[in-house]
Amino acid sequence: MPSVNQINLTPRQLQTLALIESYQKNRCYSITVQELANLLGTSKTTAFGHIAGLKEKDLLTANPGRARSLSLTRKAQRLLKSHQDSFEQAGESIPLLGRVAAGVPIEAIENTEQISLQSEFGSEDTFALKVAGDSMIGDGICDGDTVVCRHSQTAPIGKIVVAIVDNENATVKRFYTENNGVRLESSNPNYEPIYTKNCRIAGIVVGLMRKI
């Protein structure tokens, strides 16, 4: 049986695996074929073709009866780990996953851009999100900035976090617990706090980038 380093994949197949892994890691549920096609910038039929090829190589599994069932096999996970340096450009970049709201929550949109900040902000657990909105201007986070985050499912009280509300909307806010849920606090008095019982922390903000 060939080792993971001996498995021949096209760049598109490798990108497909990386997108499926990234989506699962950051949303905690599987990507649909249509969502995968959108991220790849291709048709649903072509995405199906990539999936079929990866299944043949024992790199993907899926349940035909479920829309969100695409899952990487252990072999695929080892393969992606072995290619990590190429994804991160020799440790000098981190993935830019999409946008996050600094106002009312918006849908988090993933893409495959890279930002060369790995050497500044640390490990493979780091990711970046573009800010849309001005609810965090009191903390120096402005519309159009890019926040650098460390993957975490928990956060100390008062930390600035990226939170997923209602399993689909991402927002950057300060995190506080309440008796019956969570309070996500802005640093702009024009915005009311968000109170929710359905909140998941995706990461803690550890840095900021801004174009001048």
Image (spheres, rainbow, N blue to C red):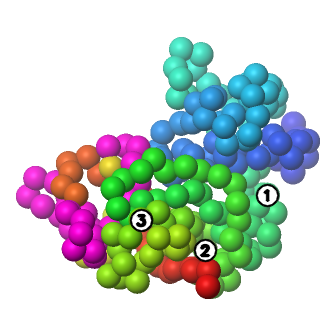
Q: Position of residue 10 (x, y in %)?
A: 89, 42
Residue type, mark 1 in image:
His
User: 10 Å neighbourhood of mark 2: few (<14), some, or many (≥20)?
Assistant: some
Q: Determine the CA span between mark 1 and mark 2.
A: 15 Å
Q: Is residue 99 magenta?
A: no
Q: Are marks 3 and 1 in contact (CB under 8 Å)?
A: no
User: 10 Å neighbourhood of mark 1: few (<14), some, or many (≥20)?
Assistant: some
Residue type, mark 2 in image:
Ser
Q: Position of residue 35 (x, y in %)?
A: 60, 35
Q: Check disc 1 and report the residue beneath it.
A: 83
Q: Residue 74: in sight, yes or no?
A: no
Q: Determine the CA span between mark 3 and mark 1.
A: 35 Å
Q: Check disc 2 and report the residue beneath it.
A: 123
How many numbered callouts? 3
Residue pictured at 64% horizontal, 28% vertical: 33
Label 3 element class: loop
Q: What segment carries the magenta color?
A: 166-193
**Quarter residue 176 falls in:** bottom left
Q: Check disc 3 and report the residue beneath it.
A: 133
Between disc 1 and disc 2, whose residue precedes? 1
Front label number (3 vs 2): 3
Between disc 3 and disc 1, whose residue precedes? 1
Q: Which mark is residue 75?
A: none
Residue pictured at 63% horizontal, 29% vertical: 34
Residue pictured at 52% horizontal, 74% vertical: 145
Label 1 element class: loop
Most extreme residue toward the left is 179
Q: Position of residue 15 (x, y in %)?
A: 76, 47
In this rendering, is residue 125 above or below 69?
below
**Quarter residue 193 falls in:** bottom left
Residue type, mark 3 in image:
Gly
